[in-house]
Amino acid sequence: MSRPPARPSERRDRGLAAEGLAASFLEERGWEIVARNHHARRGEVDLIASKGETLAFVEVRSRSATSLVHPLESLTFRKRQRIIAAAIDYAQRNRLLESRALRFDVIAILDRGDGEEEIEWIEGAFDGTGAA
């Protein structure tokens, strides 16, 4: 049995909760969250995390276990391009293009429905052209 589509406020709340979970996941692994939800004219990136010389632009995708699409499958080429645009905007504004290694990661969160989530972190999930 499928659920009715979530209202925008419910989707936003679930998205913020998933981003918080992903941020905690990264921080537990020694990453510092330097920005959340960076918006640029052509895109948005959920988390920007720093560790050593690496700056990771992290897209957080979440789905319930009953969803027909895995969180990673929901990341389209067009969405990757929008993340890249926001990342370039952030790096240019903060003069980081020449001084840091930039990387695009994805954290997929699958809500199993039993109060537990499965978290999958793909480091370097795609490159600066959007190719996976």
Image: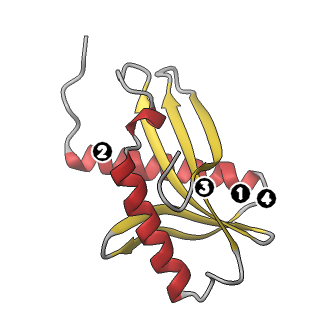
Q: Position of residue 29 (x, y in %)?
A: 77, 52
- Left or right: residue 131 compared with residue 66: right
The residue where tag 2 is placed is 11
| Vertical position of residue 122 compared to residue 69: above or below | below
Q: Quadrant of the N terminus?
A: top left
- Residue 107 lies, with reference to residue 55, above or below; the image says above
Q: Are marks 1 and 4 in contact (CB under 8 Å)?
A: yes
Q: Give the label on residue 27, or none.
A: 1
Kindly identify the amino acid type of the residue bearing the numbered disc 4.
Answer: Gly
Residues at marks 2 and 3, CA–CA distance in whole angstroms: 18 Å
Q: Residue at x 60, y 55 (%)?
A: 23
Q: Amino acid at mark 1?
A: Glu
Counting labels gives: 4
Circle nearer the N terminus (3, 4):
3
Mark 2 Cα shell of 10 Å, populated few (<14), some (14-19), many (≥20): few
* Residue 122, percent from left and from top: 63, 43
Residue named by callout 3: 23
Label 2: which secondary element: helix
